[in-house]
């Protein structure tokens, strides 16, 4: 039995090295502050947990239709109307096992062997691997602070060739937290429509915005593929339930794929998600958003004081992508030493691409303000000592 | 935006036509007996549902490690020891979103573009599509009653060529319910090992056996890929939790894939599955197995009396694959008429491949004995009238 060639092209996540060292330190009794985390620190919202528990106890938990519970698809359609003022027919909304399932479905739907897909670098590392899984060729295109780490039509034009079939964008972005303005998003949507290319808009961090709310790509076209999830804003990571919106003429094909890939998303999770849209729960989520905002303000200010450079202020998600080149020429080594000496775990830039990753660290603020303050003290101590050592 | 070529090669499930017509009839007030169903009629076992509810209410529901909850992986390893007397290191066990997730992981792990994979025909229709998704070429190989609808080394030899990379087998089989004997399974495992080919053994219906218990392919080699799930025997379809066992030297690669494909299987479902292995629950599952056995005995006897031919008696799963050629030369039309005239829904042979599918129907016995008896009456009436009409 011989392993597939594709495995060689899938990078492990470097943060796993950080994480396994962090766990070893914790076993030795060291206190580790986890700023490498990609999930909110809040538990499942209590109203959602209670509703899910009541559902689970009844025990009648069968497969749902492949596209998901009709009630949940309608609730999401209503959410698009209420939050964004956008009409999306519920038939276009496919419930998936997390956003990961949405990416599987979307990539399987559009990719042929050899198709090139443009990805923002820095960006979420799994995009490349989803593209490769289905025979496509990921093309990492550097983006920087001059465009707030996002694509625009000029960048696409400069790298577009005849093999390019589409683009993935993410706003708010992981790792930068940068949010596309509505006019910027519209320009991208229009450009890709003009090219008859696909646009996959990853909107998984929608709702976690601290300056202006995000627009959805669905506001500008009904030909885009939009991925979202209950994991981040809705605080339901472990439940693994997300969704994919497809153009109307892709519904039958998406259904065939969903039947084969998933049978259906987990039923208890779909029912739990149904409880997300009550007014009381949405109010709770707004309070959580405000907590994240406070942490962002604090962390950005403190990191800059220490000497990290934040070239694009994060307006969403729960990450700060900070330039640490004042302290090191190798952010991965810096992250390892920071952990070793102070017990603060962060994610090295090289998990997000090839665009000067050695200059960057991603700091997550999915910990309490107290812990964030403690982390800042340790980082400050470490950075100053490091500067001293080099002097 | 242009759809992938792969969609053209993915057949819809013909049973969906039956199902949508069945729903239309039900909306008209007609009583439909569902013998087309692929999931047990029992609810989630009460002990499992209660445990899951208690867990959900606590609300601390984060991602698990990509390979799954360590406790659940160990519980499954213990299950292999207790049930089969086989040692499987828990590190080789990957928890997946249903068996579907296991197939995604397994196929992504072994397939390169153009690799040929041999599949039993008749067989579960999704196998072909999983192979195609990852660039492989499914090759449907006819099997019949002479080998109880299973592969053996002679059949493999006759069709093997240099592009063939591996084989999928399923015992108990869907749709035939046929179970491989230990010596037959060992012969297949040995043959494929000798060829350095991969063997994916789909053991999702394990535990639902009515004559002899199944052997696992893991008893004969630690180089096979084994897929199982909590859906069928454990009665937890809607929870979407299954597992894949990989060879020890594939653990790191399987982990990379799982991180990218799933992040992790649904956490509440993994905790629910943990409660499956208590003695009280396993006792409840044994009682359910006995109920299935009683239904199998009844349905097989009755179908034969009516004039259906069952060439291989089903020893597992909850299906009877019956030859209806005495009544029709087109089992799909027969299924549609049977539904229309009597309200009994069954699955046409052509959902399971190209091997004389027009002669076969799959009858599921995931309904109560009362309903099964009512279905038999209706089928008898319909078949006799049909014979009369043709005369």
Image: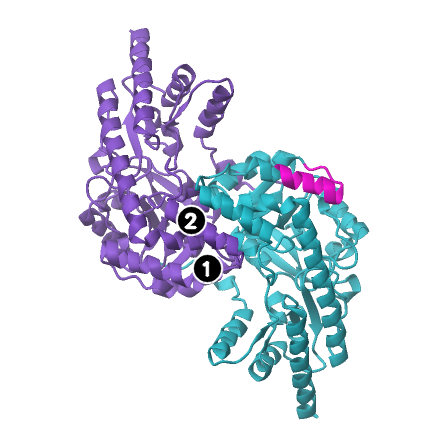
Chain colours: A cyan, B purple
User: Where residue B231 appears, x then y in whole percent?
Assistant: 39, 44
Q: Where is residue A77, by image quadrant?
A: top right
On the question of residue B1 being in view, the answer is no
- Image: B19 above or below A293: above
Residue under label 2: B50
Chain of the residue under the numbered disc 2 shown in the image: B
Q: Give the class, few, some or many, for how many residues have Cα within 10 Å of label 1's Cα (few <14, many ≥20).
A: some
Name the residue furthest right.
A183
**Above or below: residue B332 compared with residue A67:** above
Q: Quadrant of the C terminus of chain B?
A: top left
Task: Classify the position of the N terminus of chain B by image quarter.
Answer: top right
Q: In front: B281, or A215?
A: B281
**Labels 2 and 1 within one chain:** no
Q: On screen, A316 above or below B17?
A: below
Q: Nearer the viewer, residue B360 or A227?
A: A227
Q: Quadrant of residue A197?
A: top right
Q: Is residue A107 above or below residue B352?
A: below
Q: Chain of mark 1?
A: A
* Segment tinted magenta in the rendering: A74-88
The disc placed on residue A5 is 1
Q: Quadrant of residue B301?
A: top left
Q: Position of residue A326 (x, y in %)?
A: 72, 81
The reply to whether dot 2 and dot 1 touch (C-beta < 8 Å) is: no
């Amino acid at each position: 039995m011989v392993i597939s060639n594709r495995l060689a092209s899938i990078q492990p996540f470097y943060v796993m090295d950080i994480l396994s060292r962090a766990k070893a330190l914790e076993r030795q009794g060291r206190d580790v502050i986890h700023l490498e985390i990609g999930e909110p620190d809040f538990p499942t919202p209590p109203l959602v947990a209670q509703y899910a528990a009541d559902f689970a106890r009844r025990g009648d938990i069968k497969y749902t239709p492949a596209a998901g519970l009709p009630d949940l698809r309608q609730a999401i359609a209503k959410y698009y109307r209420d939050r964004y003022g956008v009409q999306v027919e519920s038939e276009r909304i496919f419930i998936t096992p997390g956003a990961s399932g949405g990416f599987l479905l979307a990539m399987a739907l559009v990719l042929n062997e050899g198709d090139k897909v443009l990805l923002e670098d820095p960006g979420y590392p799994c995009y490349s691997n989803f593209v490769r899984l289905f025979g496509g060729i990921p093309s990492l295109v550097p983006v920087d602070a001059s465009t707030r780490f996002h694509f625009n039509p000029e960048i696409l034009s400069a790298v577009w060739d005849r093999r390019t079939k589409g683009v993935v964008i993410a706003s708010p972005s992981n790792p930068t937290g940068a949010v596309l303005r509505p006019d910027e998003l519209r320009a991208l949507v229009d450009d890709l429509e003009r090219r008859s290319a696909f646009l996959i808009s990853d909107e998984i961090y929608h709702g976690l915005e601290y300056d202006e709310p995000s627009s959805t790509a669905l506001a500008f076209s009904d030909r885009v593929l939009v991925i979202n999830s209950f994991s981040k804003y809705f605080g339901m990571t472990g439940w693994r339930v997300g969704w994919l919106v497809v153009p109307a003429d892709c519904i039958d094909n998406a259904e065939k794929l969903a039947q084969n890939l998933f049978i259906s998303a987990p039923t208890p999770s779909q029912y739990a998600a149904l409880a997300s849209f009550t007014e009381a729960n949405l109010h709770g989520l707004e309070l959580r958003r405000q907590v994240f905002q406070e942490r962002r303000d604090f962390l950005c200010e403190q990191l800059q004081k220490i000497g990290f450079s934040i070239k694009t202020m994060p307006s969403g998600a729960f990450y700060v992508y900070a330039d640490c080149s004042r302290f090191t020429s190798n952010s991965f080594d810096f992250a390892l030493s920071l952990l070793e000496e102070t017990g603060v775990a962060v994610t090295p830039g090289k998990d997000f691409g090839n665009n000067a990753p050695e200059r960057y660290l991603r700091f997550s603020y999915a910990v309490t303000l107290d812990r964030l303050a403690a982390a800042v003290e340790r980082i400050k101590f470490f950075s100053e000592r490091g500067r001293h050592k080099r002097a």
